[in-house]
Image: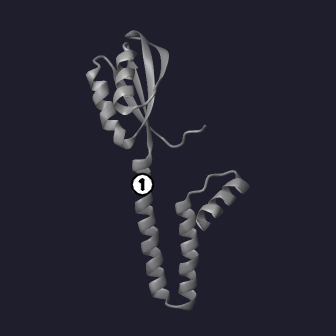
Amino acid sequence: ILANIIVDFLSAKTGKNYSLTYILLGFNACVYMAAFLVINQNAALLSLLVYVVATSIITSITDHFDAVKQVTIITKEPDNIVKDIKAELNKTCTIMNSYGVIAGENKTVICYVSYFELQKMKEIIARNKGSFSTVTTVDEILR
């Protein structure tokens, strides 16, 4: 709870988003440095090294699975795709008019899904012949 308060305080004061993980890493680094000076230098350094490596690994894994994916679908028949996305993923989409130089007029469907929903999205797109898509990892969604 204290770490969340510190993160909120720093974010409010600086206008930047700080990760709770890195705030805790900094706090624990201070604890390890105190242990280095007071108790046992070798044990403190080894503990700090293990903690930094573990934090980096855990952060990279959780960031991968927490990442939002933007799926951009180009199609001439967006209604079926949107209907399937609503029914199977319970998501809404944005449809935009677009113009393909080769195929002529198309519709662009944009939808945001989680990593775990991406496979189902691929199945929906595969069922709709003549459609293709790109998937982009989204770092941040602003509201």
**Is residue 110 rendered to the left or right of residue 83?**
right
Q: Residue at x 56, y 81 (%)?
A: 33
**Is residue 141 rendered to the left or right of residue 106?**
right
Inspect the image, locate mark 1, and give the three-letter code of the amino acid beneath it: Thr
- Locate residue 3, reporting x and y percent: 59, 65
**Is residue 8 rendered to the left or right of residue 54?**
right
Considering depth in this image, is 30 or 104 the residue closer to the camera? 30
Q: Quadrant of residue 118?
A: top left
Q: Quadrant of residue 59?
A: bottom left
The C terminus - image quarter: top right
- Locate residue 110, reporting x and y percent: 45, 26
Q: Is residue 49 above or below residue 59?
A: below
Q: Is residue 27 above or below residue 64?
A: below
- Locate residue 41, reporting x and y percent: 50, 87
Q: Residue at x 55, y 60 (%)?
A: 20
Q: Is residue 3 above or below residue 35?
A: above
Q: Residue at x 39, y 17 (%)?
A: 78
